[in-house]
Image (tube, rainbow, N blue to C red):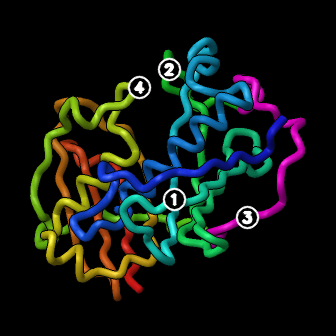
C-alpha cells in the first residue's frame, strides 16, 4: 500500500495569478486534488466513503510558500498521511522543482457522517491504520485557536454562497473560502504581497444561499479574516502571514 503519493504537474493558465505565477488558491487546489487521488488508492476515496455515509472534511490547513512557480513550469507534488488518531487525521504535502522546495502544507481532516452530520471514528470508515506511516512532518507548529467575534469597524462586506462555491459534499468548498477572502484585495495589492504562509480554520459548513459577513483586519505583518454566518456563528478564520 502506497504510504505516500507523488506526481508531476504542469502549471496551467487556469491556476496562475495575473502575474503568471501559481496562485495561492492554486496551491490549495493542487494539494486537495493530490490528497483525493491518494485517498482513492488507499481505499478511502469519495466513492468508498460515500458507501459508508462518510465524507472527508478539512478542519484546519496551513500552507507555507517559499517560491511560486511560473506558468507552464513542471513541478513535483508529494503527499503522505500521518498516523491517524481516534477521529483526526493529518496529511502533509510538498511541492518542489529541480530539488528546490516551493511550498509545504498540512491539513487536519475528519470523517463526517453524511446522514447525522456527526464526526466519525477513523475505524468506522475503514481507514488503513495498519499501513506503515511516514514519520516525516511539515508545517507542524500548533494550529491557531481562534476566539472572539468580528468587530464592526473590521467588517469588509457581505458574500452570498453560490453554486460556484459548492463541492461534492454540498457545502462550500475549502478553497472557495480562500478565493473569496483573497478577492477582498485588488490585483495591485495582491501583486505587492509576499505571502509566506496561509492558515485556515474551518469551524462550520456553509451552504448555497447563505449570507456571510467578512471581517478583515491587519494582524502584525499580515491579515486576519473572520467569516460569520447571519446568526453570528463562526464559519472560517484565515491568517495570511507575509514574508
Give the class, few, some or many, for how many residues have Cα within 10 Å of label 3's Cα (few <14, many ≥20): some
The quadrant where residue 156 appears: bottom left
Give the class, few, some or many, for how many residues have Cα within 10 Å of label 4's Cα (few <14, many ≥20): few
User: Residue 52 in the image: x percent, y percent?
Assistant: 63, 15
Residue drawn at x 13%, y 70% is 186
The residue singled out by tag 4 in the image is 168
The tag on residue 137 is 3
For discs 2 and 1, the disc positioned in front in the rendered view: 1
User: Residue 242 in the image: x percent, y percent?
Assistant: 38, 82
Q: State which tag comes first along the sequence, 3 or 2.
A: 2
The residue singled out by tag 2 in the image is 114
Q: Secondary structure at mark 4?
A: loop
Magenta stretch, residue numbers:
122-141
The residue singled out by tag 1 in the image is 74
The quadrant where residue 138 appears: bottom right
Q: State which tag comes first along the sequence, 3 or 4.
A: 3
Q: Secondary structure at mark 3?
A: loop
Amino acid at each position: 500500500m502506497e504510504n505516500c503519493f507523488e506526481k508531476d504537474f504542469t502549471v496551467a493558465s487556469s491556476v496562475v495569478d495575473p502575474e503568471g505565477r501559481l496562485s495561492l488558491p492554486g496551491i490549495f487546489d493542487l494539494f486537495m486534488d493530490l490528497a483525493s487521488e491518494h485517498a482513492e488508492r488507499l481505499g478511502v476515496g469519495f466513492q468508498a466513503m460515500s458507501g459508508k455515509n462518510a465524507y472527508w472534511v478539512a478542519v484546519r490547513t496551513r500552507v507555507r510558500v517559499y517560491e511560486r512557480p511560473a506558468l507552464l513550469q513542471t513541478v513535483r507534488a508529494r503527499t503522505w498521511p500521518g498516523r491517524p488518531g481516534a477521529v483526526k487525521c493529518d496529511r502533509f504535502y510538498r511541492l518542489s522543482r529541480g530539488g528546490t522546495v516551493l511550498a509545504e502544507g498540512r491539513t487536519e481532516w475528519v470523517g463526517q457522517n453524511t446522514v447525522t452530520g456527526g464526526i466519525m471514528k477513523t475505524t468506522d470508515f475503514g481507514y488503513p491504520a495498519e499501513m506503515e506511516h511516514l514519520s516525516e512532518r511539515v508545517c507542524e507548529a500548533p494550529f491557531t485557536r481562534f476566539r472572539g467575534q468580528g468587530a464592526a469597524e473590521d467588517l469588509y462586506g457581505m458574500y452570498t454562497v453560490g453554486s460556484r462555491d459548492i463541492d461534492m459534499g454540498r457545502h462550500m468548498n475549502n478553497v472557495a473560502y480562500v478565493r473569496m477572502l483573497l478577492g477582498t484585495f485588488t490585483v495591485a495589492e495582491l501583486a505587492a504581497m509576499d505571502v509566506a504562509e496561509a492558515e485556515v480554520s474551518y469551524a462550520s459548513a456553509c451552504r448555497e444561499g447563505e449570507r456571510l459577513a467578512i471581517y478583515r483586519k491587519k494582524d502584525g505583518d499580515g491579515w486576519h479574516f473572520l467569516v460569520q454566518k447571519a446568526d453570528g456563528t463562526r464559519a472560517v478564520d484565515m491568517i495570511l502571514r507575509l514574508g
